[in-house]
Image: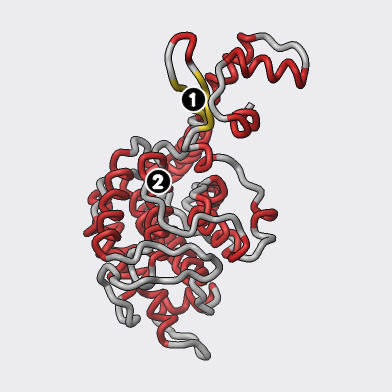
Amino acid sequence: MINLLQDRGYLGISEIVGVIQKQFGEIAKVTVNRDLNALLRLGLIERGGSGRAITYAISGRYSLLQKIDVDHYFKKEADKREAQLRFNLALFPLVHDPLYEDELFHLHKLNKVYQDNIEQLADRSIAREFERLTIELSWKSSQIEGNTYNLLETEALIKEHKEASGHKKEEAIMILNHKTTLDYIVKNKQAFRTISVRDIEHVHRLLTKNLGISPNVRKMPVGIVGTAYRPLDNEFQIREALEQACIEVNNETDPFGKALLLSLLIAYIQPFEDGNKRTSRLMSNAVLLAYDLCPLSYRSVDEIEYKKAVILFYERNNLSYFKKLFIEQFEFAVNNYFRAS
């Protein structure tokens, strides 16, 4: 039915029934109507008109939510892919409710396991587990950005302030900045129940301190490795986009949806000259912590697949693959940290 509406645009239910019967044989109108209502609930189609003039078509949210064959998409080089190369100002009204009901049910059920585990742990054990998660997040988030410290070197750096030989000073600073930022977030976690541009700027400033990166919203164009997508290049438009992103995140009713959207929208806007994806990951975790949800370390994520998921949002405004990785990382976090036994 989705393919039919993609090919033909707005169709009434009688037209839909007719085409399906022509291609596949008899089908009851009530069955088609039930399927259309299911697609409406998922936000994949939209309804127009009234009475007998009601028609159905693919919704603007379909391209946001539909599953994409990732391997097939990335077989083409960046310049040859069918991509949206400029920032899509029409995206914001479409990003609400990025998670389906069954996905939210699954995530909240997992978080109940996390909460039950936390209740059984002594404060010292919780602190020790959070230190472990901090080390692994600081390592993985930095690795995604090209940092060459391994996990054991990262542990020694954070716990013993011991810099590893054969690495640039900036790599140690990047990792330690992650820890400083996480400490700040935990200390002020309730403040992140509502997100502001100032919050994003402050977290970015902490993450990029002493790395020669401007803490200000950028005034110049920026290119991104692996994609032909070009973000906004006007400071005032960038700030406006950040404000709108905060509005959309704050309007989102479920905290998992807030965290998912914030991670993607900061990366999409690219408000700073560098450190954007780091900021998106830490801000997403800030929201999770603010609502007593298990934070993510991203330890098991493949950094190439992570980058592909973000690029799909840049080029196709499609969040399905990133959402898949987000859910997998939440599963991993609940199953690997703060375990009571």
* Whether residue 259 is situated above or below residue 130 in the rendered picture: above
User: SS for tag 2?
Assistant: loop
Q: Colour mode?
A: secondary structure
How far apart marks 1 and 2 lie (CA) works out to 19 Å
User: SS for tag 1?
Assistant: helix
Task: Judge from the rendering whether residue 163 lies leftward or rightward of residue 17; answer left or right.
Answer: left
**Percent of width and height locating residue 61:** 47, 37
**Percent of width and height locating residue 197:** 24, 57
* Whether residue 34 is situated above or below residue 243 in the rendered picture: above
| Quarter where residue 134 is shown | bottom left
Query: Which residue is more in the foreground, 177 or 95?
Result: 95
| Quarter where residue 39 is shown | top right
- Say what amino acid the circle numbered 2 marks: Leu
Res. 300 visible in picture:
no
* Whether residue 132 is situated above or below residue 93 in the rendered picture: below
User: Which mark, by number, is residue 94?
Assistant: none
Q: Quadrant of the N terminus?
A: top right
Pointer 2: what residue? 91
| Quarter where residue 49 is shown | top left
Residue at 53 percent of width and 32 percent of height: 58
Q: Residues within 10 Å of mark 2 (few under 14, many from 20)?
A: few
Pointer 1: what residue? 41
Residue at 38 percent of width and 63 percent of height: 270
- Say what amino acid the circle numbered 1 marks: Arg
